Structure formats: C-alpha cells, structure tokens
Image (cartoon, grey):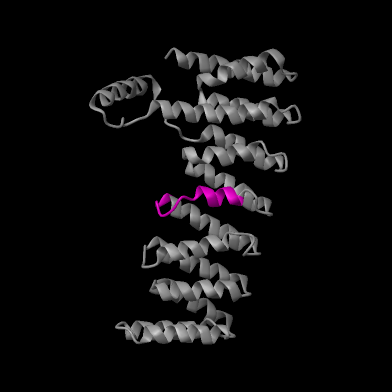
Amino acid sequence: MTMRLFWFALLTLFLAGPSRAQNAHIARLAEELESTNIAIRRQAAKSLGRVGQPLSITLLSAAMQTEDNVSIRLEIVRALRNIAFLRDPGFRQALGAIANAADQAQEEDMLVRLRATEALWEAGRKDLLDPVPFLDRGLSDPSPRLRLSAVQMLRKLGTPETIDPLGRAANDRDQPDTIRLRAIEAIGAVALMDLGPVGRNVAEANVRATELMRVDPLVDTRAITRRHEKQIGYLAAVVRDSDNTPTLVLRAVKSMGQVKDKSSIPVLQEIIETHRNEAVRKQATRVLSHVLARQYE
C-alpha cells in the first residue's frame, strides 16, 4: 500500500465521525502533503499544526519519514511543537515525533535535529516532559554544534538532574575542549539553592519543625548537600586528570568556587600542595579562602 492509500484509508474512518467538516479539511491537507509543489507541502504542514487533532499528528509523523526537503521537515517540527505546546489531543504523540526528529539515527540533517532538541528543551520548561534524557543523547550527536547546544540547554535548565550528563561531558576526552569547558562552567552554574546564612538557618528550623510534625520539609538541605558533593566530584575528576589542559583545570577550580561546598576543601588543599601549575595553585588558594569564609557566615 502506498503512503497515499494508507492516509486515505485512515481518513475514511474519521470522515464517518461527527466532525465531518474538520476531517474533510484534514483530508485535503493530507493530499497537499504529497503535492509536487514545495510551497503547498509547507503550507499543509503548517495548517496541520493549527488543526491539532490526533490524525494531523499521524500525518505529520508519517510525512517526517518520507519528506526529502529540509525546510519542510523543519516546518513539520514547528507544527508538532505547536500541537504539543497547546496541549492539543494527542500532544504526547507529538512530543514522541519530535523526539524522533532529534535522534541522529532517524534524522540526518543537523539543523532539524537541533530545532527538535530545542523544542524538547522548551517542552521541559513547560513541564510537558523530562528533557534531560534527550539533551543527554544530544551530547553524543555527530555534530559538535548540536553537542555544544545541548550543554547550553542543560545549563539553562539548571535542575539537579543535569549534573550527571554535564559531569560526563566535562570528563569525556573524546569531546572537544570547547565543549568540555562549557560543561565545566555549567556544572558550577547549576542553580542548587545557595540559601545564604539566613536562609540556611530558616531551612534548618523548618527541617526540625517538619520532623516533629512528620511532614516533608519545604527545603531538603541534606539533598542540596548531596547535589553539591556530586558537582565537586565531577570537577575534582577534571582537576586530577593529568592530561587535561591548564585551561580546563582552572575552569574546574573556578566552578568549585561557585559551588562553595565544604566537600571541595580537601580537593583544593590537594591542588595547592601538589599541582604542578602555579596559576592553578594560586586559583585554588583564592577559591579555598572563599569556601572557608562561607563556612563561618
């Protein structure tokens, strides 16, 4: 059965339903998706994104597999994004189709993969899905540009779940130093609720009170500590790798200073005592003084 026959067989089932006029409109758009005119195919994809019905998602997903024009595949990604963000019926199916478009095993064009990955990141910001697995997959994409974009999106997302993929990228010798450097910066920039002295006192009081009441605390300071320790662990691995350039090591030490967790103290002392690069030792000394000062705030 050709793709056209498949579409029309599927549409026949829907045309018998109550939304006859709308389904007739979708049937016309399905036919236009096979037009030899690129402009007509592009407009059909855009219009299906506005209809937002499960059938339109099916048609767009099928067209994504057969369309050879990159500009139209980009339009299909935008149409699926529109359906997903409006939470139209079947929006989860639309997100699945976008995820396929972000996968280099299914989509050969880097720009299409990039736009699909960006759409998944936006979907995560709207609490439609967890984008971290898709951004993590993007760190293995053949395109350095897309890998760098994945690091940047993980940084902007800034949730605790982003630490592991960023940490792996920071310590991956197969990654270019540019990407590793951005990953190291991002580890230090992950927003993990530095509450400050007053905030920490309030959080500790809340923990004590909620323990007595047997309810969950508003802020789990122990969980924050564990996250900080994970950040320091990845950064320490960068510092201890003797094959890493001074630029990467210096950035890792600076990121430790951003985290300002006491778990970095032994690592910083080790750097000051043993590292062969004077600039790195000096940077570690400055960061250590800041970390120690924080412990007495």
Residue 104 drawn at (x, y percent): 64, 60
Q: Locate the N terminus and report the quarter of the image it occupies.
A: bottom right
Question: Taking 136 as reference, is 56 above or below it?
Answer: below
Magenta part of the chain: 125-138
Question: Taking 123 as reference, is 253 above or below it?
Answer: above
Question: Taking 243 as reference, is 77 above or below it?
Answer: below
Residue 264 drawn at (x, y percent): 56, 21
User: Is residue 221 something one can see in this rendering?
Assistant: yes
Furthest residue to the front? 214
Q: Is residue 68 magenta?
A: no
Q: Residue at x 45, y 65 (%)?
A: 93
Furthest residue to the left? 213
Describe residue 160's horizontal placement relative to residue 67 as left or right.
left
Residue 113 drawn at (x, y percent): 59, 60
Q: Is residue 131 magenta?
A: yes
Front in this rendered view, residue 249 or 17: 17
Q: Residue at x 64, y 37 (%)?
A: 170
The count of marks equals: 0
Front in this rendered view, residue 16 or 280: 16
Choose top left, top right, bottom left or bottom right for residue 231. Answer: top right
Front in this rendered view, residue 213 or 20: 213
Q: Residue at x 52, y 70 (%)?
A: 76
Choose top left, top right, bottom left or bottom right for residue 103. Answer: bottom right
Residue 214 drawn at (x, y percent): 26, 28
Q: Locate the C terminus and report the quarter of the image it occupies.
A: top left
User: Is residue 194 something one can see in this rendering?
Assistant: no
Describe residue 273's horizontal placement relative to residue 75 as left or right.
right
Describe residue 7's horizontal placement relative to residue 86 as left or right.
right
